[in-house]
Image (tube, rainbow, N blue to C red):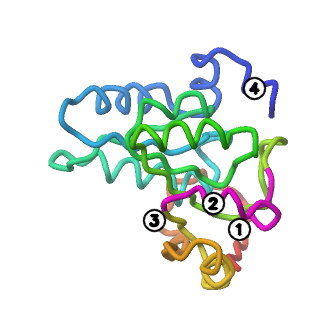
């Protein structure tokens, strides 16, 4: 929520991500000679399956592999995007960020939008990509989560790729044990 966005970054880290993971990401970003890739804004806690568990966290961890040419990190708010060479806006966006995106693009930054399940956003400022196609046109590329999204976006931005959500294997899950089973559906 907006009140959380105004908290100091240290409070956001404690509330949204493991401080140890965040410190490790910051050390990766200090490595010279690597393309810096940022994912965000991080508005949900690390146990959110749809955005954090299947999109941001595993991709960031993979990009930070020892011999990768990339150093990946996260951002909590849009003013932090300038530290990255490649910015992946995940799910949440609002029209007030367009001038910043345009300025950063003029500096050579590349932007990609990962739709995930927009318009079901967490941040109250966020809007639907359906109602704001100009945002998709600002992006260098778009990542869709379903073939329907791909077909929906291609006329607006032809640089769209499909990365479907993984099917969760409950036997190998790291989620806390519960007495019930949640049935998850990805449409």
Q: Is residue 129 magenta?
A: yes
Q: In the rendered structure, which segment of residues is drawn in magenta?
A: 127-140
Between circles 2 and 3, the one closer to the viewer is 2
Label 3: few (<14), some (14–19) or many (≥20) C-alpha neighbours in 10 Å: few
Q: Which residue is mark 2?
A: 50
At horizontal 49% and vertical 60% (from top left) the residue drawn is 140
For discs 4 and 3, the disc positioned in front in the rendered view: 4
Mark 4 or mark 2, earlier in chain = 4
| Tally of numbered tags | 4
**Looking at the picture, does residue 11 appear above or below residue 168?**
above
Residue at position x 53%, y 67% in the image = 143
Pointers 2 and 1 in contact (C-beta within 8 Å): no
List the residue tagged with mark 3: 172
- Whether label 4 touches label 2, CB < 8 Å: no
Task: Give the CA distance from mark 4 to mark 2.
Answer: 20 Å
Q: Secondary structure at mark 3?
A: helix
Q: Which residue is mark 4?
A: 4
């Amino acid at each position: 929520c907006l009140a959380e966005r105004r908290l100091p970054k240290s409070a956001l880290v404690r509330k949204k991500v493991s401080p140890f993971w965040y410190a490790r990401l910051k050390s990766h970003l200090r490595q010279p000679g690597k393309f810096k890739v940022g994912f965000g804004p991080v508005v949900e806690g690390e146990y959110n399956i749809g955005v954090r568990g299947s999109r941001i966290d595993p991709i960031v961890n993979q990009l930070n592999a020892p011999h990768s040419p990339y150093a990946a990190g996260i951002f909590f708010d849009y003013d932090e995007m300038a530290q990255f060479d490649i910015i992946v806006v995940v799910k949440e966006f609002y029209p007030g960020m367009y001038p910043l995106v345009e300025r950063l693009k003029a500096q050579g930054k590349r932007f990609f939008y990962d739709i995930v399940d927009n318009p079901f956003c967490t941040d109250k400022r966020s809007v639907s990509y359906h109602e704001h196609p100009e945002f998709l046109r600002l992006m260098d590329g778009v990542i869709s989560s379903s073939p329907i999204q791909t077909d929906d976006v291609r006329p607006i931005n032809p640089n769209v790729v499909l990365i479907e959500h993984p099917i969760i294997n409950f036997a190998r899950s790291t989620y806390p044990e519960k007495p019930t089973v949640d049935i998850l559906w990805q449409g």
